[in-house]
Image: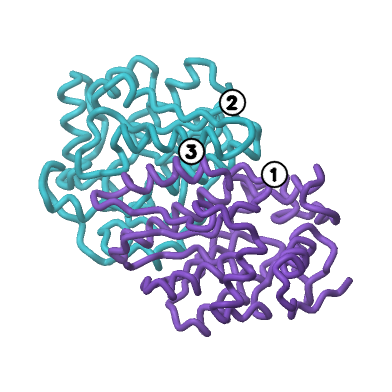
Chain colours: A cyan, B purple
Amino acid sequence: MKTILTLSGGLDSTVLLYHLQNQSHEVRCISVDYGQRHRRELRAAAEIAHRARVEHKVVDLSAIRGILAGSSQTSDIEVPEGHYEEESMKLTVVPNRNMILLALAGAWAVSTGSEAVAYAAHAGDHAIYPDCRPEFAQAMAVALGLCDWKPVQLIAPFAAEKRSKADLVKLGASLGVPFALTWSCYKGGEVHCGRCGTCQERREAHQLAGIPDPTIYGG
Amino acid sequence: MKTILTLSGGLDSTVLLYHLQNQSHEVRCISVDYGQRHRRELRAAAEIAHRARVEHKVVDLSAIRGILAGSSQTSDIEVPEGHYEEESMKLTVVPNRNMILLALAGAWAVSTGSEAVAYAAHAGDHAIYPDCRPEFAQAMAVALGLCDWKPVQLIAPFAAEKRSKADLVKLGASLGVPFALTWSCYKGGEVHCGRCGTCQERREAHQLAGIPDPTIYGG
């Protein structure tokens, strides 16, 4: 199956890349430069795609900053520290990001005659992200199925199988995922800050999975 | 109601702008530069928004050309002449365009606290455009309703009311729409070519509506 994967350069989508390849998908990866503060992740995505020997495109959507007010990830608002569960983490929400990513992936799928679009939503995605909800994924699956005459299938196996992030670390370790190449930190410095919600989550997932964490944390 | 309208600069979306204003919507307009051959329409959109005194943003998505192979509107493939019903018109389909437009409009809606996104799909939209199907609009309505904690509503009144393009010309005339400012031609020259599918359709709609057509056609 020819599949377009939305690859952020983070842990989840990298595990999905290796998982899809392991299931014999012919994968192409798409990343989007939406002016994110943590654009360091785009370099990670490029390195990961190169290592996995798959085609990778980065779509420059940085002009979108003009319509994305209110998120710490696309403005001068400071990235909140603390745990994902906290109210303050809502600041990291980028409005409608997943619909935009899936729409662009869908366009590339139609252009390349690919049967599917894949994304790495998983059961641990936090309730602060409305566009990680299974109902949202289901609606997008219906829309992608109708966006062209030949249906494009939406694959979100980690959400469907209710896998946690710790499950993904275990799966990734078994597939030889180069975790050290992946990038999670929302602050986007030279090393992972270790304090923002996504750093804390990355660390916890390794601990819960019982897998050594190769990440260098600044704090 | 605060509403984001996807304004192409064409006849349909311009009539919808006037229709929404007539219904007391507080409208903001979004256009997308996706490297379209007929980018002349973006100038039309800016003029129309200025005339209607609404905020207008053009999102530069021209980098997307790299993933949109196969359409005459985003490549060097020649624009087909002839009637919309013809097989050759499939060349003008831009893969997944409406999902991309609605996703960007949805992002701006969330950012601005708008209640709705509007687009001008109508009953005359031709069977060659899969993403003009009512089923597609319905799926996107569900997804937009879930993309944020506060639902964003999708409004496509011309599709819902089964209005034809001739009906839109009649409605627009009654609302004082400046048809001469709108741009339809897929060839994107200095004047409308008069031969491509969308020019033929524009001409026919005026004839069927019995409304004088102010468009200057080159052929």
**Taking B42 as reference, is A52 above or below it?**
above
Residue bearing mark 3: A143
* Amino acid type indicated by mark 2: Lys
**What kind of residue is marked 1?**
Ile
Most foreground residue, B96 or A117 = B96
User: In the rendering, at what x and y percent does residue A104 appear?
Assistant: 52, 46
- Secondary structure of residue under mark 1: loop
Nearer to the camera, A70 or A178? A70
Determine the residue positioned at 60% across, 66% down: B168
Q: Residues within 10 Å of mark 2 (few under 14, many from 20)?
A: some
Residue A2 has which mark? 2
Side of A154 where B84 appears, left or right: right
Left or right side of A72 for B96: right
Which residue lies under the disc numbered 1?
B128
Sequence-first tag of 2 and 3: 2
Dot 2: what SS?
Answer: strand
Image quarter for residue A124? Answer: top left
